[in-house]
Amino acid sequence: MTALDEGRRVALITGSGRGIGRATALALAAAGHNIVVHYRRDAESARATAAQVEQLGVEALVVRAELESGEDLDALVAATADRFGHIDALVANAAAGAFIGALHSQRHHVTRTMETVVGSFVHLVRAAQTWMPDGGRIVAVSGTDSAFAVPSHALIGVGKAGLEALIRFFAVELGSRGITANAVRPGPVDTDSTATYDAQVPEQAQLVRQSIPLGRMAQPQEIANVISFLCSPAASFVSGTVLPVDGGLAAGGGPWVPLQAAVDRRLREQLSPG
């Protein structure tokens, strides 16, 4: 089956060079999608994802784009359309912004984070839906910081909350075409970046783990499985919703107050003379 065969569905996944994005690319490839692997910096990881995708018997296209650049996003969608002719699923996984507390945020932090997280999502959906057949799928990857005051995630959390709000609007505005729009809200996930953070602040990582009823962090594949479901025909009547995938973390309230106290204590220790 060739890339131009209309029977092969096509998924465009931002930030798919590693972590949840890579796991999602592989899950959707296993379900029969050709995959567009987007990256911003790490071309090597993106090519590695593409190689794994192609081992599953589908095609992969690797495209670099800056989320803040409308021209880059238009080029990303155009490259997808030129190669495959349509876009059946858009998964907005990539995000970037200032990891900073609300009181320390400056206007330029706000502007850049909102443009990267919210602005890029609006732009991508608007561009991709032109090439999306009826019955297409839109999935945004949110985060626990959209609903809880996760330390140093003030602006990222606001951006993720914005994604969740936009999902409701896109579900309504695109519903007449059978296009569904949903968000997945992962809890803590065992990725390379998480491991680095855990090594730096092990006491904070322990607080998080202790607050997850299932007693562990998620594996990227577990988040990807839910995204794959939302992109499947089985989810044809699921739209406009946010699905937590957090091992029960939100149900238990989370560790956010003691976690903030631990962060504040560490900052005081770093700033104290001597």
Image (cartoon, rainbow, N blue to C red):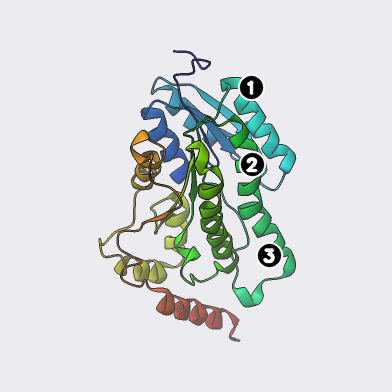
Extreme residue toward the top, this view: 1
Q: Which residue is mark 3?
A: 110
Which quarter of the figure has residue 186? bottom left
**Kind of residue at disc 1:** Asp
Sequence-first tag of 3 and 2: 3
Where is residue 264? Give x, y as percent: 51, 80
Of residues 186 and 264, the one drawn nearer to the viewer in this rendering = 186
**Kind of residue at disc 2:** Arg
Work out how far the residue at label 3 is from the one at label 1, CA to CA, in angstroms: 35 Å
Of residues 161 and 174, the one drawn nearer to the viewer in this rendering = 174
Mark number, residue 126:
2
Report the quarter where the C terminus lies.
bottom right
Report the quarter where the N terminus lies.
top left
Specify few, some or many for label 1: CA neighbours under 10 Å numbering under 14, 14-19, or 20 or more. Answer: few
Where is residue 231? Give x, y as percent: 42, 38
Vertical position of residue 70 compared to residue 80: above or below: below
Where is residue 31? Give x, y as percent: 36, 29
CB under 8 Å between discs 3 and 2: no
